[in-house]
Image (spheres, rainbow, N blue to C red):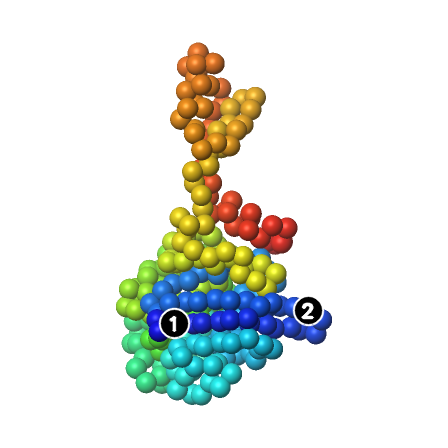
Amino acid sequence: MHDAAIRVRGLRKRYGKTTAIADLDLDVHRGETLAVLGPNGAGKSTAVQILSAQLPRDGGEVAVLGTDPARADRRFRSRLGIVSQTAGDLLELTVAEAVHHFARYYPRPRDPRRVIAEVGLTEQAKRKVGQLSGGQRRRVDVALGVVGDPELLFLDEPTTGFDPEARRRFWELIRSLAAGGTTILLTTHYLDEAAALADRIAVIAGGRIRASGTVAELVDDREVTVAWKGGAVTTDRPTALIAELGARHAGEVPGLTVTRRSLDDAYLDLIGRETTA
């Protein structure tokens, strides 16, 4: 696939007797934002670590920007941006020092001051990272991940600990990067975040992709649940049913509600009995 930023076939990874990823296939097109949803232990973070050359695989074929990450060199790594769940803290550096320091690793970095502003840390720029709150440190992780103006950006649960304002700023930043052509692979537990940012969504459970597609492709909203006092029916003909109920109750249906299927419904159906805790 000439337009594939990521191509995975039959990816496998085990930890002892535990299978983290089992024969996973995945494609991410250049310039696309793909969100990967799944419960804890589904294999999301393991996949990100393998694709971003942080973890070896046990089997399968992987190409990231045309390169096998198992053979990653410094030039390959400079094309990536990574915001992982286990990002380290540069506790004794100020925010500005940390972001400017990381910017020097890349051939064409973004303006560190602008990046600091985009993640909402301008007022904390002169404070040491070790003095920040957990949510603010997470914003530093995001800044370090995007300062290199990456061709491909991995975001592993990036907004954990963000307040609503920081989350809004992050969404704006990711949209601007996507608009500029950055390919983005995002893992998240927030379904609204996936729906807001992603071109496509992949649902992973038990180390395998259960389904992938746009929100419209994953969610069949033709099925509507019509509920009222004394009953509920799921139907693809809600208007006719409501008219029938109206006639039955002399025009006023007690407790009437009409609910279309959502991404949450589709997600829970796909992961089955997998825990989302």
Q: Which residue position holds label 2?
A: 18
Q: Which residue position holds label 1?
A: 1
Q: Residue at x 51, y 44 (%)?
A: 265
Q: In what quadrant of the picture does the N terminus appear?
A: bottom left
Q: Residue at x 41, y 20 (%)?
A: 243
**Which residue is farthest right?**
17
Q: Name the side, left or right, on which 181 lies relative to 233.
A: left
Q: In what quadrant of the picture does the C terminus appear?
A: bottom right
- Where residue 40 sits, quadrant-wise, is bottom right
Q: Residue at x 49, y 86 (%)?
A: 71
Residue 38 in the image, given as x and y percentages of width and height: 54, 58
- Where residue 101 sits, quadrant-wise, is bottom left
- Which amino acid, mark 2? Thr
**Residue 127 visible:** no
Residue 219 in the image, given as x and y percentages of width and height: 45, 46
Foreground: 269 or 73?
269
Secondary structure of the residue carrying numbered label 2: strand
Q: Residue at x 56, y 47 (%)?
A: 269
